[in-house]
Image (cartoon, rainbow, N blue to C red):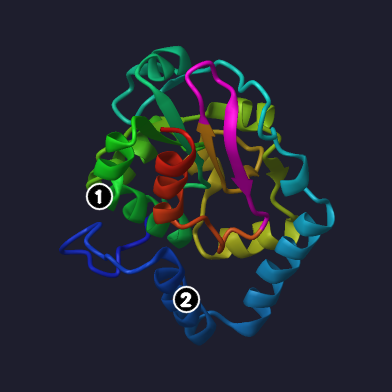
Amino acid sequence: MKWRSLEEARPGSDSRSLHEIFAERKELIAKYVPPETQAIHAQAVAELKGRHLAANILPRGAKAPDFQLQDHDGQTVSSSDLLAKGRLVLCFIRGRWCPFCVGQMEAMNLLLPQIVQAGATLVAISPQTVKQSFFMHDQHKLRFPLLSDAGNKVARQFGLTYRVPGAQESVYRRAFVNLPLANGDESWELPIPATYILDRDSTVLYAGANEDYTERPEPADIVQTLARQFN
C-alpha cells in the first residue's frame, strides 16, 4: 500500500509548485476514479467543512502541547529537543497511502535547505505506524523525520482529528487503503492536513489547516513566512 511518485526514479525532484503537482493528480483522479467514488470523497470533505474543523484548530498565539513521538527509525523525538534547535515547522499528514500527502512531503523535502537556512526544523506527524513511516521515508528519500502519532493523541490536542465517514471507509476498504493496518488501530480516525510554525517557546506563529485534503499550503510560502516575519 503506497503511492508511487510521478517520477519514481527521481523522488522529490519535481520543482513545480505544489498547486501544479496537485492539479495534475486531480486530473488523473478525475480521469480514472469512478464518478460515484469521487462523489463520496467530495461529500466527506463537504461534511468536514460543515463542521468547521479548520476554524477550531489550535490557533496562532496559543502554546503548542509538548510531545514525545517515535520517528521512522523508532527513535523517541521530543518537541522540547526540537525547539531547542530553533523554530519548528510541523506538517500533520494522513499517511503514505495518500497521494496528496506524498506530493506535499516531496515538495517540502525539496525546500528543506531553505527551511534550515531560515533557522527552523521540519518534521511531519501522522497516525501511521513507525513501520509505515519508515517505508514512506525510504521510498521518497525524505531528509526530515516522520513522527508516528499513535492514536492521533497529538493531532487531537491540535484540534485536527475526525472519524472517517462510513461511506468513505467503504471506498477505502475496496481500494485496499487499510487504515487499521497502516495506523495500528481500529479507530478509522485521521487528522485534517495542517501546517504549523512554532517559536522556540512553543508559541504558534503560523497555523494553517484545510478540511479538503487536496489543498495544502505552498512550501515556498512557508519558507517566505519564516524568512519575512520571524528572522
Identify the residue at horizontal 47%, vertical 45% (top origin).
225
Q: Is residue 96 above or below residue 85?
A: below
Which quadrant of the figure contains the C terminus?
A: top left
Residue 143 in the figure: left or right of residue 54: left
Residue 215 on image: x %, y %: 56, 62
Residue 170 on image: x %, y %: 66, 61
Q: Which residues are magenta?
A: 198-211
Element assignment for label 1: helix
Residue 86 on image: x %, y %: 38, 22
> To which quarter of the image does residue 204 belong?
top right
**First in sequence: mark 1 vs mark 2:** 2
Q: Specify whether residue 141 is in view.
A: yes
Element assignment for label 2: helix
Q: Which is nearer the eye, 40 or 195?
A: 195
Identify the residue at horizontal 63%, vertical 83% (top origin).
35
Residue 195 in the figure: left or right of residue 166: left
Q: What residue is pinned by disc 2? A: 23
On whether residue 203 falls in the magenta region, the answer is: yes
Q: What residue is pinned by disc 1? A: 139
Q: Residue furthest bottom?
A: 31
Report the amino acid beneath label 2.
Answer: Ala
Q: Which is nearer the eye, 139 or 82?
A: 82
Q: Specify whether residue 1 is in view.
A: no
Identify the residue at horizontal 62%, vertical 25% (top origin).
153
On whether residue 215 falls in the magenta region, the answer is: no
Report the amino acid beneath label 1.
Answer: Gln
Residue 106 in the figure: left or right of residue 68: left
Which quadrant of the figure contains the N terminus?
A: bottom left
Q: Is residue 170 above or below residue 204?
A: below
Identify the residue at horizontal 71%, vertical 43% (top origin).
162
For label 1, the crowd category at 10 Å Cα-Cα, with few meaning under 14, some 14 to 19 and many 20 or more, is: some
> To which quarter of the image does residue 161 belong?
top right
